[in-house]
Image (cartoon, helix red, strand yellow):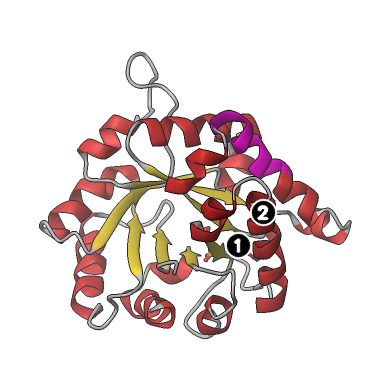
Amino acid sequence: MRRPLVAGNWKMNGDSQSTVSLVNGIVDGRGDVTRAEVLICPPYILIPRAADALNGRDDIALGAQDLDINQNGAFTGQISASMLVDAGCTYVIVGHSERRAIYGESDQDVAEKFRVAQEGGLIPVLCVGETLEERESGDTENVVARQVQAVIDVVGIENFDNSVIAYEPVWAIGTGKTATPEMAQEVHKFIRDMLSALNKDIADQLRILYGGSMNAGNAESLIGMTDIDGGLIGGASLQPDSFLAICTAAN
Ligand code: PEP
């Protein structure tokens, strides 16, 4: 039985004050959400602030939105896996479509980040997904397979046992357009089948999240699908009420 995971990707939003009030709101409202695992991924600089607000609670996990492939040294502006662990993170997002599109990260870059994250003791949340153009030209499965295969080539299928995949159709991110539960399920099943052909046990236990305009209104029908094990949430993770409604739907 896979434990659902709901992860909030705050992106480049917030400040000290809003971080404390968002964390407090999630903590206070969490109530019966005990089955679903809850993860928040603030901007780097706000991670220590979120950790302080959590005040030792370990039922809400902390993650980062990216990391560098190097451990330390002359890499101005970058943050390493060990720094994230030191700040209290257990997860890190790798290969978000904004990193791929805006910062030019290749499948190989993302695969290296996945490897370095795991070697550094973090659980990578690997984002994959097609653009609208790719979907319309019937390339969804090819794109997703290529993105997943690049990571398998670097770390091997065995290392997917301690990771999460997030299927995030690029056309659904921040647009208010959501894949229907059936569309999302089809791609989630495709990913699981691809991994299952290599190692069924790992594929069966791997959590595959959906991301792309998930909100309080559509979360239940999406997470209700067989191969959808939770969500990676952008916009709706910035308010306690909408984020908690998704956590409740996943629970
Ligand atoms: C995301 O950026 O990972 C995301 C899913 O964003 P949104 O929920 O805002 O579409």
Which residue was labeled with disc 1?
173
Residue 78, placed above or below residue 39: above
> Please, is residue 182 above or below residue 9 in the view?
below
Point 26% across, 38% down: residue = 85
**Magenta span:** 146-155
Q: How far apart are marks 1 and 2 (CA)?
A: 10 Å
Q: Residue 54's image quarter? A: bottom left
* Figure quadrant of the C terminus: bottom left
Is residue 247 shown left or right of residue 16? right
Nearest the camera: 185 or 45? 185
Which amino acid, by three-letter code, is at mark 2?
A: Gly
Please state, as top left, top right, bottom left or bottom right, where the N terminus lies in the image: bottom left
Q: Quadrant of residue 56?
A: bottom left
Q: Does the magenta stretch include residue 220?
A: no
User: How would you classify the magenta stretch by its main secondary structure?
Assistant: helix
In the rendered structure, the answer to whether residue 15 lies left or right of residue 205 reads: left
Is tag 1's residue or tag 2's residue first in the polypeptide sequence? 2
Q: Residues within 10 Å of mark 2 (few under 14, many from 20)?
A: many
- Residue at x 36%, y 13% (from the top left corner): 74
Disc 1, ligand 1: is the CB inside 8 Å? Answer: yes
Q: Position of residue 249 (x, y in %)?
A: 43, 82
Q: Label 1 sits on what residue type? A: Ile
Circle 2 sits on which residue?
129
Mark 1 and mark 2 residues within 8 Å of each other at the beta carbon = yes
Of badges 1 and 2, nearer the viewer stands: 2
- Number of marks in the image? 2
